[in-house]
Amino acid sequence: MAVTDGTVGRSAYLREAELRWAGLSLGVSVGLVAIKFAAYFLTHSDAVFSDALENIANVLTAGFGLYSIRMAHRPRMTTIRTGMGKSNFSPPGWKAR
């Protein structure tokens, strides 16, 4: 994965490593869910089906982790006059228009 945000040196290396590991985590999670659903369709076991459904949470968590790492490495938004950083978790009703 190429670094395109202008980071150089150690920070670029760390960014690439973080993205690589998060992508690997997502890939392994999706692979495990696929294997578990395949095992369910072969065996029709309720225990295997329950385990496969439970692993969907792992896929969502790995996807959110990858998204969070990508978001954390984005540059700060300079076009917004309120000084908002990379993300804003305040409810929409708090914002003054």
Image (cartoon, rainbow, N blue to C red):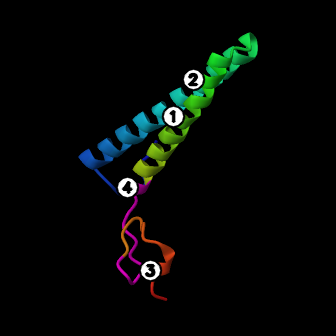
Q: Residue furthest left?
A: 10
| 30 shown above or below 62 | above
- Residue 25, percent across and down? 46, 32
| Magenta-drawn stretch, dominant element (helix, strand or loop) | loop
Q: Secondary structure at mark 3?
A: helix
Q: Secondary structure at mark 2?
A: helix
- The disc, 3 or 4, on the residue closer to the chain's N-terminal end is 4
Crowd around label 3: few <14 · some 14–19 · many ≥20 (10 Å): few
Of badges 4 and 1, nearer the viewer stands: 1
Side of 54 relative to 46 (left or right): left
Write down the residue under mark 3: 94
Tell me, for residue 39, which label it has, or none: none
Q: Determine the residue positioned at 63% across, 17% down.
A: 48
- Determine the CA span between mark 4 and mark 2: 27 Å
* Quadrant housing residue 16: top left
- The disc, 4 or 2, on the residue closer to the chain's N-terminal end is 2
Residue type, label 2: Leu
Residue type, label 1: Asn
Write down the residue under mark 1: 58
- Residue 8, percent across and down? 29, 51
Write down the residue under mark 4: 72
Give the extent of the magenta segment: 71-83
- Residue 12, percent across and down? 32, 47
Residue type, label 4: Ala
Q: Residue furthest front?
A: 46
Q: Determine the residue positioned at 62% across, 17% down.
A: 47
Tell me, for residue 32, which label it has, or none: 2
